[in-house]
Image (cartoon, grey):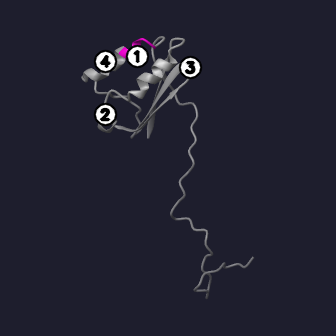
Amino acid sequence: MAQFVLVVPLKPGTAERARELLAEGPPFDLAETEFRRHAVHTTDREVIFVFDIDGESATLRLPGDDPALWQAAAAWREVMDGKPRVARLAFSWERPEPSGDVFYEPTPGPGDSDGGEIYPP
C-alpha cells in the first residue's frame, strides 16, 4: 500500500474556517475512488490530507470533471497561504500481524499424544 500526503498551508487566523470546510466532507464520493483509507489532520497553520492507496505508486487521482470538486477548490482559496506541498515519507513503522503458523502451546513429544515438550525444563 502506498501513501500520498498533501500539506496545505493556511493563512493566519483561518484554521477554524478550514475546519468548517472539512466538516462538509470531501467533494467527491470516496467509495468511487481508488483510496483504501483517507484521513485529514489539522493544526493552526496547516491541513494535512493523507490518502492510502493500494499498490506501490502513490498517485492522487480525483474526478477532475466534477463541478463540485472545482467549487470546493474555490472555497479553499480563501484559507490557503501558498501552494500545497507533497510530503515525502521519511520513516514508517508497522506492528507485524501475528502469523497463523506460530503456536505457543506445548509441542507433542515422542509417546505423548496429549502434547508436551521433547526436552523437559
User: Which is more toward the observer, 34 or 88?
Assistant: 34
Circle 1 residues within 10 Å: few <14, some 14–19, many ≥20: some
Mark number displayed over residue 76: 1
- The answer to whether the residue labelled 2 contacts the one labelled 1, judged by CB atoms less than 8 Å apart, is no
- Of callouts 3 and 1, the N-terminal one: 3
Circle 4 residues within 10 Å: few <14, some 14–19, many ≥20: few
Up the image or down, 58 lies above or below 71; here it is below
- Of callouts 2 and 1, the N-terminal one: 2
The residue pinned by badge 2 equals 29
User: What's the residue at 45%, 14% (across, down)?
Assistant: 79
Q: Secondary structure at mark 4?
A: helix
User: Which is more toward the observer, 48 or 44?
Assistant: 44
The residue pinned by badge 3 equals 44
The Cα–Cα distance between marks 2 and 4, rounded to whole angstroms, is 15 Å
Q: Residue furthest bottom?
A: 111
Quarter holding residue 118 = bottom right
The Cα–Cα distance between marks 4 and 3, rounded to whole angstroms, is 24 Å
The residue pinned by badge 4 equals 71
User: What's the residue at 25%, 21% (across, down)?
Assistant: 67
- The answer to whether the residue labelled 3 contacts the one labelled 1, judged by CB atoms less than 8 Å apart, is no
